[in-house]
Amino acid sequence: MFIRTVAASFVLATPVAMASSFPDHAVTLIVPFSAGGPTDVVARHLAKAMEKSLKQTIVVENRPSAGGIVGVEKLLRSAADGYTLLIHNIGMSTVKSINPQLQFDPQKDFSYVGEVADVPMTLVGKRALQPKDFGSLRSYLQEHGKSINISNAGIGTASHLCALMLMSKLKLDMTMIPYKGAAPALTDLQGGQVDLLCDQITTTLSPIQANRVKSYGTTSRKRLDSLPNLPTLSEQGLKDFEINVWHAIYAPKGTPEPAIDRLSEALQAALADKQFTDSMFKLGAVPVSADRATPASLEQHLGSQISLWSPLIEQSSVYLK
Ligand code: ASP
C-alpha cells in the first residue's frame, strides 16, 4: 500500500514538476539545411523570440545534408525531453513520397509543437540567362532542354519539389543540381554557375531587388506585396502552380506533454511579438495565426499536405532524380 502510494505520487508529481521547471537549460533547435538559407533565417529569428518567453538560450544547430534527412534523423536519435527540437518546412510532407525507402514516418515518429510561418517561392535565374520574362524562358527551355540546369537544396526539399513541378507542368526535362541547402545554391546562381533555382523568398528577395538575379515568377496564389511587379507562375500560364513553404517545429516522439505545451506557448508568444512578426514580413514570410501554432493543428496540416503532394509527386516521378 505504502509503495503504491509513493509510486502514484511520483507519477503524478513528474509532469507538474516538469511544467514549472522546464526548460532549466539551453534548448537546441536543429535546422536540417545550411546556415544562411531560408529555413535557417526563419529559425534564427524564431529562436531569438522564443528565448524571451522560455528564458533560456536556444542554440541553432545546422545539420545540412541529404535534403534535410540527416537533420531529421539527428532529432530522432535525441532524447525525448523537449531540449532538442527540429524546424522543418513543406519538405516534411514530401520527403517520404520522394524517398520511399526512408525508415522514419513523419506521421508516426514525431511529437508536434506547431507551425511557424508560410513562405512563398520565386523562380529565379542567373543574371546572364537570356530570357527576360517567363514567356520567353518557357520557349528557351523548350529549345535547350537538358542543357539548362536547375539547382535545389537536396532531393525531397521544397526547391526540388518546385523544380519537379515545373518540369512536369512544362513537360520538359532539365538537369537537376542538388546542393546541401538553398544558401550555397543561391550563391552559385549569383555567381553564374547554375541557370535556375526556385526557392523561398526569404533569401531570394534581396538578390531580386538588387538585380543580382533574374526573376520569372512566384509560386503564390496572388502577387506579393514585396514584389508587386513580379507575376505569379499561375497567371503566366502554369495553372494552379502554387507552393506554399510552411515551416513548423517538431520534437522527438514521446516528448512529455508539459514540455510540448510550454514550447507551444513560447511559439505563440513569438507569434504575438511584433519584433518577430515584423522581421518575418520584411523577409516576405507570413507568420501563422495562433491557432496554427499548436500540436493538433500541425498534425492535421501535415496529414493534409501529405495527401495533397503524394499523388502529384507520383505523377511527376518520371522527372525524379
Ligand atoms: N529552401 C530549402 C528547400 O528547398 C531549404 C533551406 O531552407 O535551405 O527546402
Image: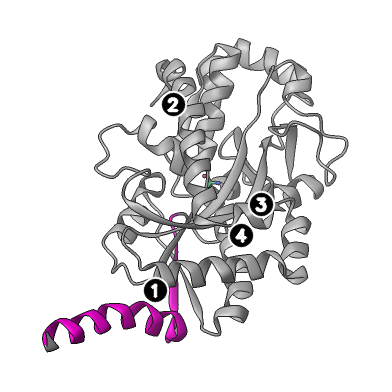
Q: Residues within 10 Å of mark 2 (few under 14, many from 20)?
A: some
Q: Label 4, label 3: how many angstroms apart (C-alpha)?
A: 10 Å
| The C terminus - image quarter | top left
Q: Nearer the viewer, mark 1 or mark 4?
A: 1
Q: Label 2, label 3: how many angstroms apart (C-alpha)?
A: 27 Å
Which residue is label 3 attached to? Answer: 203
The numbered mark, 1 or 4, whose residue comes first in the sequence reads 4
- Under mark 2, the amino acid is Ser
Q: Are marks 3 and 1 in contact (CB under 8 Å)?
A: no
Which residue is label 2 attached to? Answer: 310
Q: Secondary structure at mark 4?
A: helix
Distance from mark 3 CB to nearest ligand 1 atom below 8 Å: yes
- Under mark 4, the amino acid is Val
How is colour applied across the structure in the image? one colour
The numbered mark, 4 or 3, whose residue comes first in the sequence reads 4
Horizontal arrangement in the rendering, residue 85 relative to residue 234 (left or right): left
Q: Secondary structure at mark 3?
A: helix
Q: Label 1, label 2: how many angstroms apart (C-alpha)?
A: 32 Å
Q: Which is nearer the eye, 170 or 307?
A: 307
Asked whether 237 falls inside the magenta stretch, the response is: no
Q: Which mark is residue 42?
A: 4
Residue at point 11%, 84% (across, down): 1
Q: Position of residue 107 (x, y in %)?
A: 37, 43
